[in-house]
Image: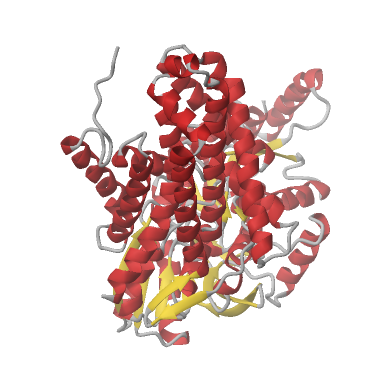
Amino acid sequence: MSEFLQQLLNGLSLGAIYALIALGYTMVYGVLRFINFAHSDVFMVGAFIGYYLGKLVPENTVWGGLVVLLAAMLGCALLGMIIERLAYRPLRGAATLNVLITAIGVSLLLEYSGQVFFGATPRTFPAVFPSANYAFGSLVISSNQILVIVVAALLMVALQLIVYRTKIGTAMRAVSLNPKAAQLVGVNNDVVISFTFGLGSALAGAGGILYALNYPSIDPLMGVMPGLKAFVAAVLGGIGNIPGAALGGLLLGTVETFVNGSQWSTYKDAIAFAILIIILLFRPAGLLGKFTVEKV
Amino acid sequence: MNSFSSFVGARFPRAVTLLAVTVSLFILTACTREPDAITLGHYASLTGKDAAFGVATRKGVLLAIEEINAKGGVLGRPLAYLVEDIQSKQGESATAVKKLISRDKVVAVIGANASANSLEAAPICQNSQIPMMAISSTNPRVTEVGDYIFRICFIDPFQGAVLAKFAHTSLKAKRVALLTAVNSPYSVGLSAVLRQDFTARGGEIIAEQKYNEGEKDFRAQLTALRPLKPDVIAITGFYAEAALICLQARALGIDVPFIGGDGWEAPQLIELGGKAVEGTYYSTYFSAENDAAEVRAFVKKFSARWTNETPEAVSALGYDAVYLIAAAMTNAGTTAGPKLRDAIAATKNFPGVTGQTTIDEKRNSAKAAVMLTVKNGRSLFFESVTP
């Protein structure tokens, strides 16, 4: 029983990170209907911002950790907006495929410039937040795991509030529904899209820091696998749907952890992806997604 | 040109040789005045996750080559050195070795650290009849590729036996759990021998959990091992994962000793693992803390050359590999592939900094292993083990 609870906890903390990255994929998809493959590399840049800043602030302090977290989110938001401005905006109105391929290009550009600027050797991420382990019987939970789950939950709630309770959120939903009509009623599409990228990238930055705190070995290709998993999580939950991304992330993290702890650990990814295929067979729009016919 | 004149030298009487040498010298002076350098090729991961090994090896290799050249080179010719970066990627080794052999015309190849990389390159060296000396590729299959493939280190069965004996005798463990990197031939091989030898000694392997290299989350596997209460956990993979596993195990309240093979040997183990890797043990080829005179002399030269750095085990192996090949060239009197191969294969009790090396009939090196332990952020010499 305690092993089950421990695995559940491990799975939830891994899933929370997947969920954070998945939110970025799903938001951009919701507004622009395209997959921003560079998202997982913004995640990596977030971890590296934390790595360099973490050396400047005192280690193991809450405020130091928060400064690093906020700075990484801010830096990534800026990077996301720059990417959107330089790479995606010129292609607005072009076929989705062109934008998709550009996204892959930006992703590779970030990965390999990362190898040039940061070096390819794995770095050790500093312990920016104070860390401790709490034991409840044989159930052990680390403060970093709690931090991941709490920060992820807070950010998801904040995101939900922004999208449904604020003016800019309303504008985002309007652009998502019909960009031309939104423009006609006075929404500045460019600002809204830029904001969406900034918000999504900030979440990726937060994800990068939280991931690096839990797995303190970072390198320029660290975003590839978590990015892929988060993308799967977003599809699993119903791409374009914010609670769906969170649900998909948690589900994927938990399943992966349970398989990993069993004797079939070698088939971990195979089983995770098989579940994705089965769910999509029965619910083609994902768990919480609404099925809509694509208008051509 | 050079291989031609030495070929002649081996078959014909002295006068003819002299004539041939004069003629070839005449032709040679037309293009170069210096004697042609003997080129040694080296492929290693200088970047990427295995970079720690490749970079450390290169430093040892380069030191040996510089020393040999300072003493006048081999066969009256200086040694030249070419290194190709395989970027810790699968598939790069084959390309690198093809380039070294066909374009750069190297006479011998110093091999990679990871067995997977050496296995890729070995068939190419074998087909081109260029001897290859693997550095720390301990998987037995490497030298089974063919008779041109050698290694300067011991092999997994030997290392597995060392770990089994160490766990059984020195740590007095009865129940050992294994963590194996299933996508690494090195780790799979080491785990298999450890299991076999430890069981043969009357111990019990209570569980084996698997992971993939490059993964970062091992809490699931560790949580599954925790209720089984093993005496010792052996991680047979490499340092990056080993350090993360130790970190996550300590966080989960697992406080048994961890042991591992030479894949752990890198400064990053301690940098990344911090307090979590204290009290862990790993086997390797060489310890800079060893009091033997040749080791002390090597450590001194190495830190003079590389601004106060201490040599890693792979640096010492790289250093020995160059000297062993150079000695074989001198004995063979030529750099031609087949003759050089025979000379390397005939090496007996070669005195190196990693101990006396004898190349056995399977082209492996027989030598003793050392166990290191991590204490106060440093890897210290624990004991020397022969199984």
- Can residue A143 be seen at all in this image of the molecule? yes
Determine whether B266 is above or below B111 in the image: below
Can residue B195 be seen in this snapshot?
no
Q: How many marks?
A: 0
Near-viewer residue (B153 or B167): B167
At a point 74% along the width and 74% down the height, the residue shown is: B293
On the image, which quarter does residue B160 sit in?
bottom left
Relative vertical location of residue A167 with respect to residue A158 in this rendering, above or below: above
Question: Residue at the spot x=50%, y=43% of the render?
Answer: A223
Closer-to-camera residue (B74/B145): B145
In this rendering, would B382 be left or right of A28? right
Position of residue B206 measured from the top left corner of the image (x, y, whole percent)? 29, 76
Residue B360 placement (x, y as % from top left): 47, 60
* Left or right side of B51 for B161: left
Q: Nearer the viewer, residue A79 or B5?
A: A79
Eyeballing the image, is B4 above or below B197? above
Residue A151's x, y, as percent?
50, 56
- Residue B375: give x, y in percent of width and height: 63, 78
Query: Which residue: 31% across, 47% down?
Result: A269
Residue in the foreground of this view, choosing between B326 and A24: A24
Q: Indicate the quadrant containing the N terminus of chain B: top left, top right, bottom left or bottom right.
A: top right
